[in-house]
Amino acid sequence: MSPPLNRINSDERLPAQVDVVVIGGGVIGVSAAYHLAKKGLSVALVEKGHVGGEQSSRNWGWCRQQGRAREEIPLAREALRLWEDMQNDAGVDAGFRRTGVLFLTKSKEELASWERWAAVAREMQVHSTVLTPAEVAERMPGNTD
Ligand SMILES: Cc1cc2nc3c(=O)[nH]c(=O)nc-3n(C[C@H](O)[C@H](O)[C@H](O)COP(=O)(O)OP(=O)(O)OC[C@H]3O[C@@H](n4cnc5c(N)ncnc54)[C@H](O)[C@@H]3O)c2cc1C
């Protein structure tokens, strides 16, 4: 379960002047504002509702490398690094955990496509393994499918 969303109290007075105005306080706007402020720019983050209150607090919360296109992997790796840094910098528990991700299938075609992807993973130094049914049972005791 994702952590509860902490309500941010907005200042309703707009600053007279800022270097950058970011419109929208979802993960993208907050992240842009955070990194601009870290670079020393003054930033106003403008949100019409609650910061983080829309799509950014309703997704599955995955920060996944597995199964991605080769071209996306450097970006996904950088995103993981940023999540870890942001959490450490801010000194708060944002709920980010590196736990790995497990995909299950009964489809031979899908399994074959994952096996092909495992070669991409090796090439890109992403740790990914195709498990046997016995290994899945060991990791997920009680799973009967
Ligand atoms: C079912 C589902 C599952 C997903 N799972 C994942 C996942 O596991 N991992 C992942 O990385 N991504 C996932 N995503 C995608 C991810 O949720 C979005 O890409 C991300 O939240 C988009 O962030 P955002 O900041 O662009 O948008 P939002 O979070 O929607 O933020 C936009 C903000 O702008 C504000 N706003 C809009 N108009 C104005 C205005 N005129 N003035 C002021 N404020 C305004 C809104 O109120 C809102 O707060 C999932 C998406 C869906 C639908």
Image (cartoon, helix red, strand yellow):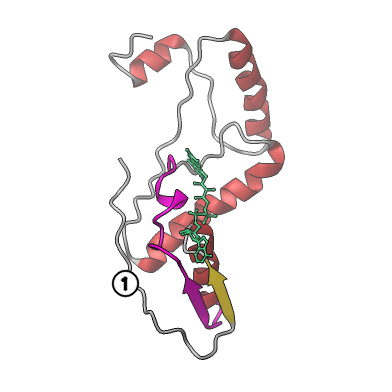
Across and down, in percent, residue 124 comes to 66, 38
Above or below, 107 against 73 in this view is: above
Is 43 contained in the magenta span? yes
25 on left or right of 138: right
Q: What residue is drawn where x is 40% and y is 63%? A: 49
How many discs appear? 1
Q: What residue is drawn where x is 58% and y is 53%? A: 78
Q: Residues within 10 Å of mark 1 (few under 14, many from 20)?
A: few
Across and down, in percent, residue 73 comes to 64, 43
Across and down, in percent, residue 112 comes to 64, 14
Of the pair 88 and 6, the residue shown nearer to us: 6
Q: Quadrant of residue 84?
A: bottom left
Q: Quadrant of residue 88?
A: bottom left
Name the residue type under label 1: Asn
Q: What residue is drawn where x is 65% and y is 19%? A: 113
Q: Residue furthest bottom?
A: 16
Q: Write down the region rendered in magenta.
A: 39-61
Above or below, 129 against 61 in this view is: above
Of the pair 72 and 124, the residue shown nearer to us: 72
Above or below, 5 against 73 in this view is: below
Residue designated by label 1: 9
Above or below, 79 against 48 in this view is: above
Q: Residue furthest right?
A: 71
Q: Secondary structure at mark 1?
A: loop
Which quarter of the rendered picture does the C terminus lie within?
Answer: top left
Q: What residue is drawn where x is 54% and y is 68%? A: 23
Is 42 contained in the magenta span? yes
46 on left or right of 10: right
Which quarter of the rendered picture does the N terminus lie within?
Answer: top left
- The secondary structure making up most of the magenta span is loop
Of the pair 77 and 37, the residue shown nearer to us: 37
